[in-house]
Image: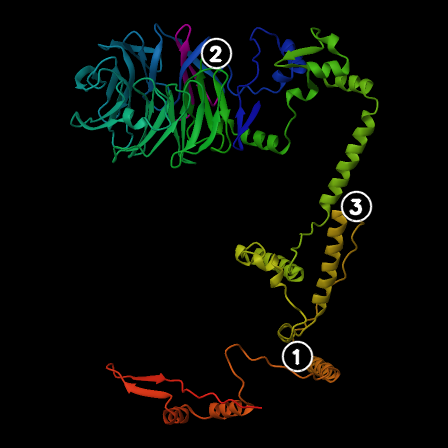
Amino acid sequence: MQVSSLNEVKIYSLSAGRSLPEWLSDRKKRALQKKDVDIRRRIELIQDFEMPTVCTKIKVSRDGQYIMAVGTYKPRIRCYDTYQLSQKFERCLDAEVVTFEILSDDYSKIVFLQCDRFVEFHSQQGHYYRTRIPKFGRDFSYHYPSCDLYFVGASSEVFRLNLEQGRFLNSLQTDAAENNVCDINPVHFLFATGTAEGKVECWDPRTRNRVGLLDCALSSVTADTEINCLPSISALKFNGALKMAVGTSTGQVLLYDLRSNNPLIVKDHQYGLPIKSIEFQHHLDLIISADSRIIKMWNKDTGKIFTSMEPEYDINDVCLYPNSGMLMTANEAPKMNIYYMPVLGPAPRWCSFLDNLTEELEENPESTVYDDYKFVTRKDLENLGLAHLIGSTLLRAYMHGFFMDIRLYHKAKMMANPFAYEEYRREKIRHKIEETRAQRVQLKKLPKVNKELALKLIEEEGEEQQLTRKRKQKNMPSLLKDDRFKVMFENPDFQVDEQSEEFRLLNPLVSKTSEKRKKKLKLLLEQEAKEQEEEEEPEGKPSDAESSESSDDEKGWVEEVRKQRKLLRQEEKVKRQERFKEDQQTLLKPQFFEIKEGEEFRSFKDSAKKQKLMKKTLGDRLKLEEKLGTLNVSDTTVGSKQATFRLKKVPLQCSGG
């Protein structure tokens, strides 16, 4: 069983590995299983789940018990019973089957559309009836309320065959030259047909009138798509009452809401190949679309790829087993592939052991086939001195190199490099040291600014996480990770001054926890310095048990506040004494004043008068200036007053000496 993973989605291929011929004896089979790893690890989920040459279509009955597949050559149908995990019956046909439909819940009623225009009906016993349609058919759908079969093909008409009356009814005339695919909505039974011109025509079976027309060819062409021809409709599938997926011949999948002409989303396979099959996965809201090269699973709302698979051979059809994670494909090869993805759903009831098997594989992943071999290039062989083995049975050519036995490789490497063991020993010692370091308590690096505050926040965050786990609450965001407070731990201007008066009055308690935090901070700084020097650090000693005594009592808090205030007063007194001593030591020196340019020195009396004048009120000063004639007060037109100051001219007095 091969396991692949894409986008962290495990895909188990249940049909991988070689199958043993039927004519081999049991003893020979056991001998092959012991020798061949590929045969020993294979899982044969359903016995003989294959066709002679090619499988074209594969479907599951509505009760989930039977899997039916058609293929060539010779044209045949094979029915497999899932409860018995083996083939139930096989019937050969006269012509190749284009498509088929299971009308009953089990295998008792089957309709085949063959490539020679014949429609063949089979019952539980075998062949039942055969009729012919006027044109070559490409697809058909069954309308359960009226028991009508709708055939589309190389004609503009849609042929209707009523199974209750056993005769053809009036055809539906479409505007298309040819119709490729058709489908009937399982909720309100709207009939839709996809044309070769890239349009979808919707018909109401009750009135036999066309009720809608979608131009999918125009909608599939986007800015990123490159097309060389007109996109025709190659796949059609309804999902519920309102959703419909359309696949084009140029590799696009369009998801429509029947109430709108524009697609909800357009998904391009990027291969330019016609879409062969479309399936809906309701558990994860996925669409499974496939062309002949790749199977893609993507979200129907966003278009984001969930996972994809690329089988070895071209794909003809894809079938999703209902309500499970199993997927089956019909390929251009004898073997039909079976894939199991636990993410999509559980395994079906008839193979429920797959869940336990995949769980064991995830817990204990097995080594691959290539673990016993070493891939080497031609240059590696020359370095080992084994270039002469090219062409012998000891080397298996693969891509740009060779596979050789791992034991032979180790022996040759020991001979070429005798000191390889010492290098291996040093590497193992280094890995052991790294493992022991990883088991230690990983201490977080502290910022450059406010380290003690950051350490306090880290401790409080750890305590809050424990409380939230107990109370099952959501964790609050940390201040250290918040961008709004990032500058506080980066800019030195935001450093907390613990010796300031404000800090000491707001934080009067110097408790044991803060002292231990300082010790822990010192240890952290020493450890960071040692890591920068790339030296091995000794084993850390266990920290002292923290005291459980609480220091937040009101009485203790008041005493600490009084103590801090007393210390602050003593420090202020010491500062005043120091300033007084400095003032006494300083000598008073005369100060000289310089007169500004343009001014004259009269006497110190003028300055004394100005000082007296400045002590008076504004009203007294205005009255004095009016008497001296330096102030003029007048009313304005607005109602306010205007004051004008004038300078008084004083004659110069010259004093002779």
Residue at image position (39%, 18%) is 273
Residue position marked by numbered label 3 in the rendering: 535
Amino acid under disc 2:
Pro
Foreground disc of the pair 1, 2: 1
Quadrant location, the N terminus: top right
Residue position marked by numbered label 2 in the rendering: 334
Quadrant location, the C terminus: bottom right
First in residue order: circle 2 vs circle 3: 2
Identify the magenta region. 63-84
In the displayed structure, 14 sits above or below 631; it is: above
What separation in Å lies between label 2 and label 3 (alpha carbons)? 64 Å
* Label disc, if present, on residue 561 of the rendered structure: 1
Residue at image position (75%, 18%) is 409
**Which is nearer the eye, 163 or 639?**
639
Residue 566, image x and y in percent? 69, 82
Residue 574, image x and y in percent? 73, 81
Give the class, few, some or many, for how many residues have Cα within 10 Å of label 3's Cα (few <14, many ≥20): few
Of helix, strand and loop, which one carries label 3? loop
**Which is nearer the eye, 217 or 435?**
217
Magenta segment includes 64: yes
Q: Tell me: 616 left or right of 155.
A: right
**In the displayed image of the protein, which residue is found farthest to the front?**
657
Give the class, few, some or many, for how many residues have Cα within 10 Å of label 2's Cα (few <14, many ≥20): some
In the displayed structure, 423 sits above or below 590; it is: above
Give the class, few, some or many, for how many residues have Cα within 10 Å of label 1's Cα (few <14, many ≥20): some
Q: Tell me: 221 left or right of 425.
A: left
